[in-house]
């Protein structure tokens, strides 16, 4: 969370600088691109997105992203075969962008809300027994479903008429985190966490068409 806040401050400074040094106007367009850098509560990763303008005034667009995130697994045991030291999350996070500045400028500033859903299906590790008795370890199925909402700030810089670099930062709340542990004997345990603060930072590279 601290790293996301620091990156957000840098983004605000870049917004101010670039608005003072905007280049010649460029024609607004839809975008398709990649996220080479993404930081969220679920880890670090990359993704793909599609942005499409809606309406006739070029002030509103929708963004449809999908991200793959990787997070270190603290209970990893290298002595157990077919296990990994990390977990993979899939995240879907549709957003709306409301352009505050003229979208025809080379540098545009927008704000907007986003919703996200992230999913994890992995294996967990639990220790059975206690010292000085017999101790064994068991793998179990581990699933997480997370839902949340963010308020975002977007900065898009047109490198040329067809290529755009973007920065996005957002803060909000993870309003539901549903965890399921499914053990080998068929026992299932569930728990839910609600209303946890979250943040996000993303860098994008896109092609305009």
Image (cartoon, rainbow, N blue to C red):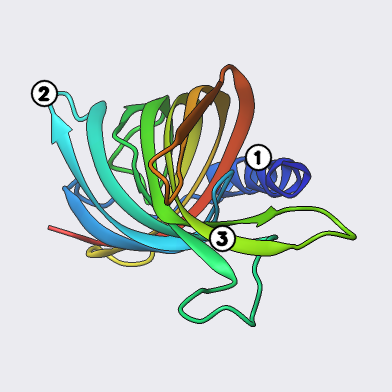
- Pointer 1 and pointer 3: residues touching (CB < 8 Å)? no
Residue count near mark 3 (Cα–Cα under 10 Å), binned few <14, some 14–19, many ≥20:
few
Residue count near mark 1 (Cα–Cα under 10 Å), binned few <14, some 14–19, many ≥20:
some
Say whether residue 189 is left or right of residue 14. left
Query: Which residue is at 63% across, 23% downward?
Result: 196
**Which of the two marks, 1 or 3, is nearer to us in this view?**
3
Cα distance between the residues tagged 1 and 2: 28 Å
Query: Which residue is at 56% across, 24% downward?
Result: 172
> Residue tagged by mark 1?
12
Callout 1: SS: helix
Q: Position of residue 72 (x, y in %)?
A: 63, 63
- Pointer 2 and pointer 3: residues touching (CB < 8 Å)? no
Looking at the image, is mark 1 or mark 2 earlier in the sequence? Answer: 1
Q: Is residue 158 visible?
A: no
Q: Quadrant of the C terminus?
A: bottom left
Callout 3: SS: strand
Residue count near mark 2 (Cα–Cα under 10 Å), binned few <14, some 14–19, many ≥20:
few
> Residue tagged by mark 3?
138
Q: Quadrant of the N terminus?
A: top right
Between 95 and 126, the residue placed more toward the observer is 126
Q: Is residue 98 visible?
A: yes
> Residue tagged by mark 2?
55
Looking at the image, is mark 2 or mark 3 earlier in the sequence? Answer: 2
Q: In this figure, what is the number of numbered marks?
A: 3
**Which of the two marks, 2 or 3, is nearer to us in this view?**
3
Say whether residue 27 is left or right of residue 166. left
Query: Which residue is at 46% across, 47% downward?
Result: 183
Cα distance between the residues tagged 2 and 3: 55 Å
Q: Position of residue 19 (x, y in %)?
A: 54, 42
């Amino acid at each position: 969370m601290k790293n996301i806040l620091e990156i957000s401050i840098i983004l605000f400074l870049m917004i101010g600088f670039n608005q003072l040094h905007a280049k010649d106007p460029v024609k607004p367009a839809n975008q398709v691109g990649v996220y080479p850098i993404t930081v969220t509560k679920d880890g670090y990763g990359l993704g793909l997105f599609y942005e499409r303008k809606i309406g006739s005034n070029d002030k509103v667009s929708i963004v449809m992203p999908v991200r793959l995130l990787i997070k270190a697994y603290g209970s990893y045991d290298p002595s157990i075969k077919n296990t990994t030291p990390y977990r993979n999350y899939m995240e879907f996070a549709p957003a709306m962008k409301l352009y505050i500045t003229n979208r025809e400028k080379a540098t545009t500033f927008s704000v907007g809300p986003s919703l996200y859903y992230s999913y994890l299906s992995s294996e967990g590790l639990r220790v059975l027994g206690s010292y000085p008795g017999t101790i064994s370890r068991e793998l179990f199925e581990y699933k997480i479903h997370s839902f949340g909402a963010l308020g975002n700030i977007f900065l898009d810089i047109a490198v040329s008429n067809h290529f755009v670099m973007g920065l996005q930062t957002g803060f909000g709340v993870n309003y539901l985190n549903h965890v399921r542990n499914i053990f080998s004997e068929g026992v299932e345990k569930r728990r839910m966490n609600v209303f946890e603060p979250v943040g996000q930072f993303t860098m994008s590279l896109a092609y305009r068409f």
